[in-house]
């Protein structure tokens, strides 16, 4: 599971480039990425 927006405790927002890199890595290993974006609309 990934929390890309306002991850606690620092309030980190994952940059778009890192999100794409994570997707590429997940595709290479054929794994699912589940995004928990409960705070996404705050950005």
Image (cartoon, rainbow, N blue to C red):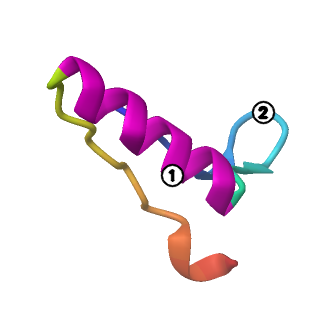
12 magenta-colored: no
Q: Earlier in the sequence, mark 2 or mark 1?
A: 2
Residue 24 rendering spot, x and y as whole percentages: 39, 39
Query: Horizontally, is 23 left or right of 9 in the view?
Result: left
The residue sitting at 54% across, 50% down in the picture is: 19
The residue sitting at 37% across, 49% down in the picture is: 36
Residue 1 rendering spot, x and y as whole percentages: 34, 31
Q: Which residues are magenta?
A: 16-29
The residue sitting at 54% across, 81% down in the picture is: 41
Q: State whether residue 31 is above or below residue 22.
A: above
Q: Nearer the viewer, mark 2 or mark 1?
A: 1
Residue occupying the far right of the picture = 10
Question: What SS does tag 2 mark?
Answer: loop
Residue 7 rendering spot, x and y as whole percentages: 66, 42
Q: Which residue is mark 1?
A: 20
Q: State whether residue 19 is above or below residue 38.
A: above
Q: Nearer the viewer, residue 23 or 43?
A: 23
Q: State whether residue 34 is above or below residue 17.
A: above
Query: Horizontally, is 30 left or right of 14 in the view?
Result: left
Which mark is on residue 9? 2
On-image quarter of the C terminus:
bottom right
19 magenta-colored: yes
Query: Horizontally, is 20 left or right of 42 in the view?
Result: left
């Amino acid at each position: 599971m990934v929390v890309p927006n306002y991850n606690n405790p620092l309030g980190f927002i994952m940059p778009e480039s890192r999100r794409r890199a994570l997707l590429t890595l997940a595709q290479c290993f054929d794994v699912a990425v589940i995004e928990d974006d409960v705070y996404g609309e705050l950005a």
